[in-house]
Image (cartoon, rainbow, N blue to C red):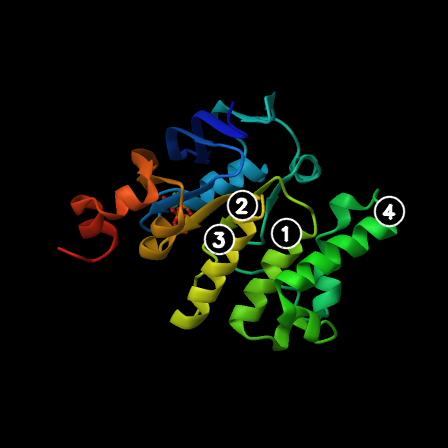
Amino acid sequence: MPLLEIRDMTVGYGRIEALHGISLSVEDGELVTLIGANGAGKTTTMRAISGIRPLTSGSIIFDGQDITRMKAHLRVVAGIVQAPEGRGVFPGMTVQENLDMGHYARKFESKTAYQETLDQVFERFPRLGERRSQVGGTLSGGEQQMVAIGRALMARPRVLLLDEPSMGLAPMVIQSIFKIITEINKTGTTILLVEQNAQQALSRSSRAYILETGEVVKTGPGPELLADPAIKEAYLGVA
Ligand code: ATP
C-alpha cells in the first residue's frame, strides 16, 4: 500500500478547473518528482495534498486513511509537511525562531524530543547552526531555502512536500540543495518534489510524473524519463 495516494483528483479555482482528475502515488521511502511547465498544476497538486485547496472530486489517502477532508493543520500532525512555498522565511525572525515555528505540530512532545530534532536539523544544515541568531531577511537565497526545509523537518514529516526548492538559486547552490534533498530521502523521509529543473530532479528521483495542463501524461522511473526523447525536447531544451 502506498504511503500517499491520490485518486482521480479534480481541483479548481472558481469555475476554472486546474486539475482534471489526476492520480498518483508515493511509496514509503520514495523520492517522487512532479515535472511540468508553468501553469500545469504542480502547485495546485501540492496545495490539495497539504489541505490548503479543497478537492472538487476524487480522494487523497494517506497511510491507509482517507484524508480528503482533513484540515490542513491536522495533516501536518499526521506527517504531511510542506516546506513553505517560495521559501517563506520570516524575515524579522532569527533562524532559530523560524525553525521553532515548524515545531508547533510537535508541541506535545518533550523538551528532549524537541532538542533532538533541532540537533538533527543543525547537523543536516551546519550553516544554520552557525547562523542561528541571524535574522532570516539577511540570509542568502540558498540559506533561506535551507531554513524553509529545516522548518519543515522540525515537524518530523513522514512525507515532505517541496515546491520548487531550486527556484531563483545559483547553479552551485542548486546542486547543494538537491544533494541535501537526496540525503534527507536516503535517511528515511519520503519526499514529493515539484520541479522545473528536470535534469537534476529526474536524475535523483525513484519515479516521476509529467503533468501537462492539469493531467498526468507520463510516469516512470526518473532516469528512464530523463532518457525519453520527447521529455528531453519538452523539458530539457534538447531537440
Ligand atoms: P508554476 O510553475 O507557474 O507555479 P504550476 O504547475 O504550479 O505552475 P499552478 O500554479 O498549479 O501551476 O496553476 C494551475 C492552473 O491554475 C493555472 O492555469 C493557473 O492559472 C490556475 N491558478 C493557480 N492559482 C490560481 C488562483 N489563485 N486563482 C485562479 N487560478 C489559479
Q: Visible in this render: residue 130? A: yes
Query: Which amino acid type is marked by label 2?
Result: Leu
Q: Which mark is residue 182?
A: 3
Please name which of the two marks, 3 or 1, marks the residue nearer to the observer.
Answer: 3
| 79 sits to left or right of 48 | right
Q: Residues within 10 Å of mark 1 (few under 14, many from 20)?
A: many
* SS of the residue under disc 2: strand
Among numbered discs 3 and 1, the one appearing first in the sequence: 1
Residue at horizontal 47%, vertical 66%? Answer: 176
Alpha carbon distance from label 2 to label 1: 9 Å
Residue at horizontal 48%, vertical 58%? Answer: 165
Pointer 2: what residue?
161
Query: Which amino acid type is marked by label 3?
Result: Thr
Residue at horizontal 44%, vertical 61%? Answer: 166
Q: Residues within 10 Å of mark 2 (few under 14, many from 20)?
A: many
Query: Does label 2 point to a residue whose CB lies under 8 Å from ligand 1?
Result: no
Alpha carbon distance from label 2 to label 3: 13 Å
Among numbered discs 2 and 1, the one appearing first in the sequence: 1
Alpha carbon distance from label 3 to label 4: 29 Å
Alpha carbon distance from label 3 to label 1: 15 Å
Dividing the picture into quadrants, the one containing residue 118 is bottom right
Pointer 1: what residue?
152
Pointer 4: what residue?
110
| 161 sits to left or right of 174 | right
Q: Mark 2 and mark 1 in contact? Answer it, CB < 8 Å.
A: yes
Q: Visible in this render: residue 53? A: no
**Residue 21 image point, x, y percent:** 38, 27
